[in-house]
Structures are given as structure tokens and as C-alpha cells.
Image: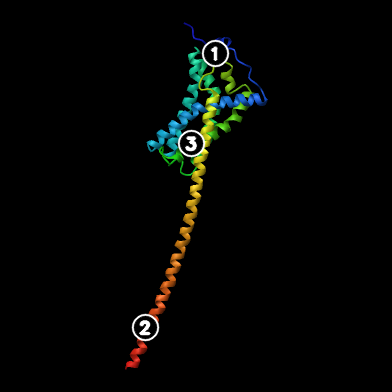
Amino acid sequence: MSTVTAHDHQPQHQHHEMPASGGALTRVALSATLHCLTGCAIGEVLGMVIGTALGFSQLGTIALAVTLAFAFGYALTSLPLLRAGLAWSAVIPIALASDTLSIATMEVVDNALMLAIPGAMEAGVGSLLFWGSLSFALVIAGAVAVPVNRWLIARGKGHAVVHATGIHGGLSPRTVGIAAAVAFVFGSSVLIAELAGGSNGGDRHGEGAEHGAAAPALSEHAAAADARTAAFTARTAAFTARVAR
């Protein structure tokens, strides 16, 4: 039995020509990004959850998340091609060309945000801050990847490579887009609430600091008053003793 290659399989699938500019190109780039974001998000979430739950260092957690993001991203592109009968030798270059730069962009942005958001990496999987930060970071990472994918597709690279096969799989971009919108609202809400809570805590801390600073001053005044009273009492006692003699 002969193995089907990408070239042999291509005529069996009809597909629209890839746009080269304008809004149509942007829509294709957005669709490609959402497809890539699916695998990236699965791997990133698993890596962050596993690394955090097992007490990995920040570097170890990020390394695991990045590895799984690439693994799932490549897998979601490769599986439909393999099911269609393409050989591994054809699928691997397609997956690498289609997803590598897009996933790399998302991972850099996502993990940079997770490190930048105070307490996000240390919050733990049971914390709203952890999930809110991760949701927000993934959506922002996807948004940054859209112009990258647009630039690649316009030059016949990136998602244009897998598009040329006419074989597509995974969740629909609409479904992923709705999930991304929900994730953004959730993540933004959590971070805004955290920021507001931190500001109130800072105000309370500032008030406490003022009271704390005032307390030593009051103590010093009280001590000085006690010293003056003691001195006056001593002089009065001495004067009384001289009169008595």
C-alpha cells in the first residue's frame, strides 16, 4: 500500500484561494490564530496546573507549559492531516511551518504576563487570581499573534501551508472565539477586582502606618511628661526634707 503525500492528496480537496491583503486576510489570520490558540491554551493550562500543583519552580513550570503548548499545537494541526492519509514525512514539515512562530509568539507573551502579574505564579490552582491571570494572558497572547500570522499568510507561510492541503480540523473558530471572549471578560474582572482590593489594602496599610508612626511620638511625649513629673516630685521632696530639718 502506497503512502499518500501532501502533493498527491491536494487535488482531492477543494479550497478557496488564500487572500493576500485587506480584511479578508485579517479574517483568515484571526481564524488561524484561534485554531493555534486552542492547542496552545490546552498545553499552557495543563503545564501551569501541573507545575503549580507539584510545586515546580517558576522556570520549571514555564518550561513544562511551553513544551505542552507546542505539543498540543502541533498535534491539533497534524491529526487531521494524518487521518486524511498524509504521511508523517509530509505532515511534520506542514505542522512546523504552520504553527511554530505563532505558538512561540503566544508563549512569550503569555508567560511574560504571568510573571509580570503580581502573585499569579504563586497563587495556586485553587485561586481565582491564578485562573484570571492565565485566562487574560492567553487571550492577550492570541491577540498579539494575529498580526504575526497575517504577515506570514500574506507571504505564503504559516497557516497558508496547511491551508494549501485543503484539510482542516479542530474546533470551529467561532467556538474558540466565543471561549476567548468569555476568558477575557473573566480574566479582566478578576484582575480589576484584585487591583481594587490591593488599592484598598494599600490605603488601609497607609493609615495603619500613619497610626504606627504617631504611636511612638505619643509615647515619647508621655515619657517626657512622666520625667518632668518625677523631677518635680523629687525637688518637692527635697525641699520638704530641708524645711523639716
Say what amino acid the circle numbered 3 marks. Answer: Leu
> Furthest-top residue in view?
1
| Separation of marks 1 and 2 at Cα, in angstroms | 106 Å
> Given the image, on which type of amino acid does mark 1 rest?
Ala
How many marks do you count on the picture? 3
Residue 6 circle label: 1
Q: Quadrant of the C terminus?
A: bottom left
Mark 1 or 2, which is nearer the eye?
A: 2
Q: Position of residue 159 (x, y in %)?
A: 57, 22
Category of crowding for the residue at label 3, using alpha-carbon neighbours closer than 10 angstroms: few (below 14), some (14–19), many (at least 20): many
Residue type at tag 2: Ala
Q: Earlier in the sequence, mark 1 or mark 3?
A: 1
Disc with the residue nearer the chain's start (1 vs 2) = 1
Q: Which residue is mark 2?
A: 234
Front label number (1 vs 3)? 3
What residue is shown with label 3?
134
Q: Is residue 211 visible?
A: yes
Classify residue 174 by image quadrant.
Answer: top right
The local secondary structure at tag 2 comes to helix
Instruction: Provide residue 194's location: percent of width, then percent of height.
Output: 49, 45
Structural distance between the alpha carbons of marks 1 and 3: 37 Å
Count neighbours of disc 1 (C-alpha within 10 A) and say few if under 14, some if 14 to 19, many if 20 or more: many
Residue at 46% over, 58% down: 208
Residue in the image at 58% along x and 19% along y? 161
Q: Position of residue 1 (x, y in %)?
A: 46, 5
Q: In the visual, does 60 lie left or right of 139?
A: left
Are dots 1 and 2 in contact, CB under 8 Å? no
Q: Residue at x 49, y 23 (%)?
A: 74
- The earlier-in-sequence mark between 2 and 3 is 3
Residue 82 spot, x, y in % from top left: 48, 15
